Image (tube, rainbow, N blue to C red):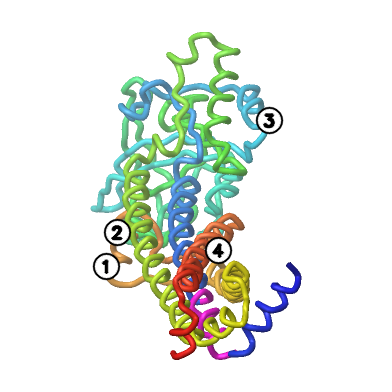
Amino acid sequence: MWTYVILAWRNLWRNKRRTLIAASSVFFAVVLALLMRSMQTGYYDYMIDSSVRTYTGHIQIQGKDYWEKRSFEESMTLDDEMITKVNQIDGVEMSVKRLETFSLISYGMVTRVVQVVGINPEEEDKLTSLKSRIVKGEYLSNDSPGIILAEGLADLLNADIGDSILIYGQGLYGITAAELIPVQAIVRFSLPAQNKAYAYLSLSYAQWVYSATDRITSLSIMLDNRKKINSIQSEIKTLFETTNENSGDVYDIMTWEELSPELVQYIQVDNAQGIIMLGILYIVIAFGIFGTIMMMTAERVKEFGILISVGMKKWKLYLVTTLETIFISFIGVVAGALVSLPLVIYFVNHPIPLTGEMADTMLAWGFEPILPFALYPGMFFAQIWTVLAIAMVSGLYPINFIRKIKPVEAMRG
């Protein structure tokens, strides 16, 4: 067997140009497939991560029916002991309490409807990096009686640090919530819609303004691995049922997929389109590899005829040509993976900025217009094995050709 391996390897380098052309077809196939899949996967991961870190978390605990009605009457109370138990579940990275509502905000003659979010400043900063977005003023503390405005909203109101704005809305049980609050900081978001419609209060102060003492509208939970989401959701439900048999009538425990169904549908449709495009790419790759192997086989007709005429068994020729195909495929795959790895790493760290219609689409979905890439070991193995399989199937052509060859005709060319 070792003799045939050496013979196949030497055969490759008897015609270096032919070998390099064949290996190049596999090389470019691997590079294209890996970059395309890395781009698709990175795009989906970015959208999901942006959604969960900006708003939903991987899992949210809410008061029963709050998601449908968005009313303070469906808000909830969660004691610190229960939150601690949730945080101690294996796979839970952190949890963030929020009190969210819509209110009128006025300054001077300008009034806007905005989303007011009561936050625990330290927890929120760990999740959304809100503190790093400040362009003016000072970040909130746990008992700050001030408000943070998004920069676009501050511009619309023509308000600045130290100005007192009026919040007017509805608190718990229909109680009127009205308060003059000084602007403590201004933050900048990259998304226009978010930059014009968000305001933040410290959680304790928001609970006082809206007469919702000790109440929250959601507990957003971040996980260390998105793949654990279903098991951890079940574990949280079990924890609540153990504490309160009627917890199903008091709380909703929802995943980000349930909270963002439009995003899930968009990713599914786009992924299906991506798989179709990847399939078309594989077809083009298959024709390229097959055409190269056909060329290699056609160039060696006379060689095959001479070898058979001097007594070489056809099965041995099958073995040698198969080994040649394996070597060529392996060279192309390894070279493609080695070249793709630094390219993917570069694009993971330097996402491509988008412009035009694609940028508008991303902004409409509430995401920054960039095209990120992802790097997973499984992604490399999947694409490499697919291209390698295509090359091996194409390698059946020389075997079929040799099976039908007639030595006398072959030696005549």
In the rendered image, residue 268, in percent from the top left (x then y), is placed at 36, 47
Q: Earlier in the sequence, mark 2 or mark 1?
A: 2
Q: CA distance from mark 3 to mark 1?
A: 44 Å
Q: CA distance from mark 3 to mark 2?
A: 43 Å
Judge whether residue 22 is colored magenta. Answer: yes
For this rendering, which residue is in front, 386 or 320?
Answer: 320
Residue segment shown in magenta:
16-27
Look at 76% across and 70% down and name the residue there: 2
Q: Residues within 10 Å of mark 4 (few under 14, many from 20)?
A: many
In the rendered image, residue 8, in percent from the top left (x then y), is placed at 65, 77
Q: Residues at badges 1 and 4 in contact (C-beta under 8 Å)? A: no
Look at 53% across and 71% down and name the residue there: 347
Say which residue label 4 marks.
384
Q: Amino acid at mark 2?
A: Leu
Q: Earlier in the sequence, mark 4 or mark 2?
A: 2
**Res 136 visible:** no
For this rendering, which residue is in front, 316 or 201?
Answer: 316
Q: Is residue 118 above or below residue 53?
A: above
Q: Earlier in the sequence, mark 3 or mark 2?
A: 3
Say which residue label 2 marks.
156
Q: Earlier in the sequence, mark 3 or mark 1?
A: 3
Label 4: element kind: helix
Residue 412 relative to residue 122: left or right: left
Name the residue at the left extreme: 109
Q: Residues at badges 2 and 1 in contact (C-beta under 8 Å)? A: no
- Which callout, 4 or 2, points to the residue nearer the camera? 4
